[in-house]
Amino acid sequence: MPESVPVRCPACRREHVYTVPAYPCVCGAPTAPRLDPAAHPVVAAHRAWDDEWISVPCTACGRPGQWPHPELGCPCGTVLRIPVAQAPPADPGTRPTAAGTSPSAAAAEPVPAAHRAAFRPRAIRTARDAVTVAALYLRWLGYRDIRRADQRPPNGIGLAAHGLLAQVDPTVRPAAARDVECLWLTAMTESADCVYLSLAGYTDEARARADTLGVPLFVLDLAGVPQPLNDAADILNEAGAPDGQPWARRRP
């Protein structure tokens, strides 16, 4: 049962009950951070990428995951960051997975969609929600160590993982061919694959250019479900993250 704690907004003094959300580990088990009922919530006055994510080990398989820090939006407009209890470090050597494989080794293997738990969407109401959904979806595909990309793209937010560069465009403007080309060129310089996720879709020129370059295109609907838009996206959605080889080279 999800953990809940009472929360009082320091700005308006309203009382709330916060229930921590659970996110799906790649093994399929729900994962949620442990809350600290003895600590007081703090006002999230300034945003910093490193403060938005916390490391939470899965209680089923021991894999460490990066998930959004628990937050509560008060009707008065204040955003409260909910304190999290310090989680003990996961010991991969004491948490074997199937066939005796360590979690770190299993995490590097692609998991076909048919053998993965269903992706759990999260409603998109803000640009931050779109980035969060994109990060959760990439983790569901099997990518690890998702972080903010070193280079900021011309539009949207850049995310990076081992062997992958993703661009998340939460604007209401359809992505253009130049956006797709810039992402592809940047990924080429880093010897990485790339994925584009857009909230408003793509122009016809962008879709044609993506097909030529082999860039997977996804559309983020407001329900928080990334929808594959081309063949490259269908393949990635089905096959999941590759095991050290660029996914495009594994196409049938």
Image (cartoon, grey):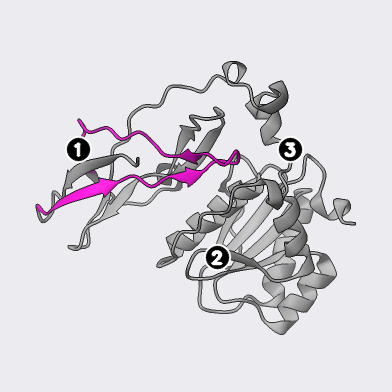
Camera-nearest residue between 27 and 187 = 27
Q: Residue at x 9, y 52 (%)?
A: 13
Q: Quadrant of residue 174?
A: bottom right
**In the rendered image, which residue does mark 1 sit on?**
40
Q: What amino acid does circle 2 point to?
A: Gly
Label 2 or label 1, whichever lies nearer to me, is 1
* Residue 173 in sight from this viewpoint: yes
**Residue 144 x/y as whole percent:** 62, 40
**Relative to 185, is 37 above or below?**
above
**Residue 53 x/y as whole percent:** 44, 43
Q: Earlier in the sequence, mark 3 or mark 2?
A: 3
Q: Earlier in the sequence, mark 1 or mark 3?
A: 1
**In the rendered image, which residue does mark 2 sit on?**
156
Image check: 40 left or right of 130? left
Image check: 162 left or right of 59? right
Can you say which quadrant of the picture contains the C terminus?
bottom right
Q: Which residues are magenta?
A: 13-41
Mark 1 and mark 3: Cα distance apart in space: 40 Å
Q: Residues within 10 Å of mark 2 (few under 14, many from 20)?
A: some
**In the rendered image, which residue does mark 3 sit on?**
109
Camera-nearest residue between 9 and 90 = 90
Label 2 residue SS: loop
Can you say which quadrant of the picture contains the N terminus?
top left
**Residue 7 x/y as whole percent:** 18, 45
Q: What amino acid does circle 1 point to?
A: His
Q: Residues within 10 Å of mark 3 (few under 14, many from 20)?
A: some
Question: Does the segment drawn in magenta span residue 108?
Answer: no
Image check: 125 left or right of 134? left
